[in-house]
Amino acid sequence: MLWFIRRPLIRRWQRFAFYERVPVERREKSWEHFKAQNRWASKHGLKLITFLMNLLFASIIINVTYYGMEYLFEEGFLSPLHK
């Protein structure tokens, strides 16, 4: 449990150590890369998450419908001879 409490501090120290030891050009390059990732995420991230959630819900609905109908046919509830 203590590890989860200390983790943000450890990350902060690691970032500080990274910025202390890395040349300015690499720092600028990593900052530009971060900004590009952030731009992509703000532009496409919500669309991607929405699409994946829709795909998940569609597959759930399709599977429940299929197995529900299969159960109804096997039990004879939808059989034409069932009276």
Image (cartoon, rainbow, N blue to C red):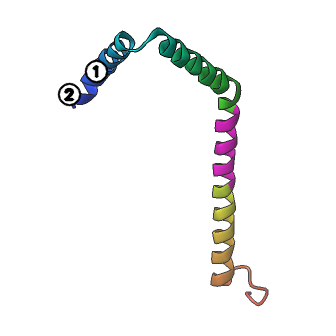
Which label sits on residue 2? 2
Which callout, 2 or 1, points to the residue nearer the camera?
1
Quadrant position of residue 19 = top left
Magenta-colored stretch includes residue 61: no
Magenta-colored stretch includes residue 57: yes
- Circle 2 — which element? helix
Along the viewing direction, whichever of 52 and 65 lies nearer the viewer: 52
Q: Quadrant of the N terminus?
A: top left
Residue 52 x/y as whole percent: 65, 44
Horizontal arrangement in the rendering, residue 5 relative to residue 69 (left or right): left
On screen, 80 above or below 47?
A: below
- Distance from disc 2 to disc 1, alpha carbons, whole Å, reads 12 Å
On screen, 37 above or below 50?
A: above
Instruction: Give the amino acid at mark 1.
Output: Ile
Q: Residue at x 64, y 83 (%)?
A: 74
Q: Residue at x 63, y 56 (%)?
A: 60
Q: Residue at label 1?
A: 10
Disc 1 crowd rating (10 Å Cα; few below 14, some 14-19, many 20+) is few
Q: Main secondary structure of the magenta part?
A: helix
On screen, 78 above or below 46?
A: below
